[in-house]
Image: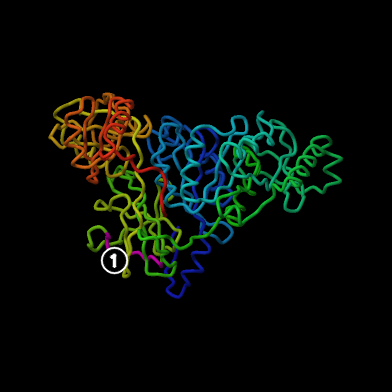
Amino acid sequence: MSLAVTPDVDVSAEAVRRRTFAIISHPDAGKTTLTEKFLLYAGAVVEAGAVKARGGRRRVTSDWMALEQQRGISITSTVLQFTYRDHVVNLLDTPGHRDFSEDTYRVLAAADAAIMVLDVAKGIEPQTLKLFEVCRARSLPVLTFLNKYDRPGRDPLELLDQIEAQIGLRPTPVTWPVGIPGDFRGVIDRRDGGFVRYHRTARGATAAPEEGVDADRAAAEEGDAWHQAREATALLDEVGATLDVASFLAGESSPLFVGSALTNFGVRHLLDAVVDLAPPAAPRLDAQGRARRIDAPCAGFVFKIQANMDPAHRDHVAFMRVCSGRFTRGMTLVHGPSGRPFSTKYAASVFGSERDTIDVAYPGDVIGLVNASGLQIGDTLYATEPVTFPPVATFAPELFASARPRDAGRHKQFHRGLTQLEREGVVQVLRDPDGDPIPVLAAVGAMQFEVFAHRLADEFGAVTDLTPAPYKAARRTDRDTAERLRQVRAARVFVRADGTLLALFDSPYQLQRLERDHPDWCLEPVLSAGDPR
């Protein structure tokens, strides 16, 4: 999507039109299917599932990486921008694999709201909890979508109790199902009491026809299913589980919708809620905790870097969230960390792996800065009024492995790929300050290692052997403590690219003993998922 430059456009008015949100879920809850159906209802694709992979294998627009298409899973985040009801929607599609979550955490730093997708048969699963903790740390408003209601599953009232008990978020159903899971007739819209009946389409390729039915007719035609749904909504009314926009924006309650992304049931209600309920772009806090005005000169921060989205050109794309002012292609921004000018001649609007030249962007938009090899995750860019935004959080690694090229003759390709993937945050690369050339990779989930090895081989021609390392815990430390740790068995100190010293321990019990016996040593938890933006 390319927007024409219009100098007289009011920046604040454009910011109000923006909705920037992420979809989070446990694997297989239907997140990527829902993403594609949003594109269908917004008219961004003509037919769901129309985008084909080589050999006829079906893939969705957001899954562009070769490994994603081979495995049928989302393993990297991407940005999809489209218009809906005269609003500009920036949808941040996040990884859905249970072992790959650090990229998701970073993407949430750029979002203003989130949709939590739950499988009606499975409810809340560990990954859902982990992701929601990040949302809560950032005070992100969360919409909830009970998906796959066209299949057998759990009672929705039971799921409401689970959400409140495990997440601490009060669900407030906006739509309520008529029919049990697996026999989905439609929904009652609790805002007006109307019944919306759904009708299937072939393979869910087009928008599901919706039929508005009055209460008397619904009672006659739906029988017990209607009466049971009405009893449930009456109970919800009694306990006060009704839409409360103020508590939703405060991160205390979650408007809940019911449907089936596969059949397109309930998709329109949810997409309308993004426009009607999710907050627009608002002033962002800088590193000093001061709110950056929306109409201040252009500024933003880089939350993601991706190389080789276009393998033919082996390019680098830095994804920047615009936080203030009007961005115009070709303007010169200042790279905050270095103070050097940065040209934006090759700015693009990114749609999965596809891109179009973008001429203008406003707060809330995400733009791709192509050939941005000098940028790092967390870097601030600004026009004329200096600002520094808080750094994008890094996370406590849980898994470790050493890496070396299988063919010693490919060591240059290996190190070039290692440097690039480290910049992208695919893994954390830890190096021995005493000169051991074999790097240690640190990750939140095992899938990060698989992506690392795949991309080194596929994009850099360096087949890599990964050997699990024995470390079980990591702590941030300083130089004085690092010297003392040299005398400790089963402990080693490494340095990260940002200069942070990390102490790795073979045993969590040994770490606990050191913390108890040496309270003056610097052994701090690695930065958590909380993000002060």
Total labels: the figure holds 1
Q: Is residue 169 magenta?
A: no
Up-down: is 184 above or below 306?
A: above
Toward the viewer: 273 or 165?
A: 165
Say which residue label 1 marks: 332
Q: Where is residue 270 shown, x and y percent of the image?
A: 61, 48
Residue occupying the point 56% across, 39% down: 167
Q: Is residue 326 magenta?
A: yes
The colour scheme applied to this rendered structure is rainbow
Q: Where's the C terminus, which quadrant? A: bottom left
What SS does tag 1 mark? strand
Toward the viewer: 359 or 275?
A: 275
The residue stretch that appears in magenta: 325-336
Residue positioned most to the bottom? 8
Residue occupying the point 31% across, 61% down: 344
Q: Where is residue 32 shown, x and y percent of the image?
A: 51, 39
Q: Where's the N terminus, which quadrant? A: bottom left
Q: Mark 1 is on which residue type? A: Thr
Toward the viewer: 393 or 262?
A: 393
Q: Is residue 167 left or right of residue 9?
A: right
Up-down: is 325 above or below 119?
A: below
Q: Where is residue 298 shown, x and y percent of the image?
A: 37, 66
Q: Is residue 178 left or right of residue 382?
A: right
Other-residue count near label 1 (Cα within 10 Å), few / some / many at <14 / 14–19 / ≥20: some
Toward the viewer: 417 or 23?
A: 23
Residue occupying the point 66% across, 47% down: 172
Q: Is residue 256 left or right of residue 52?
A: right
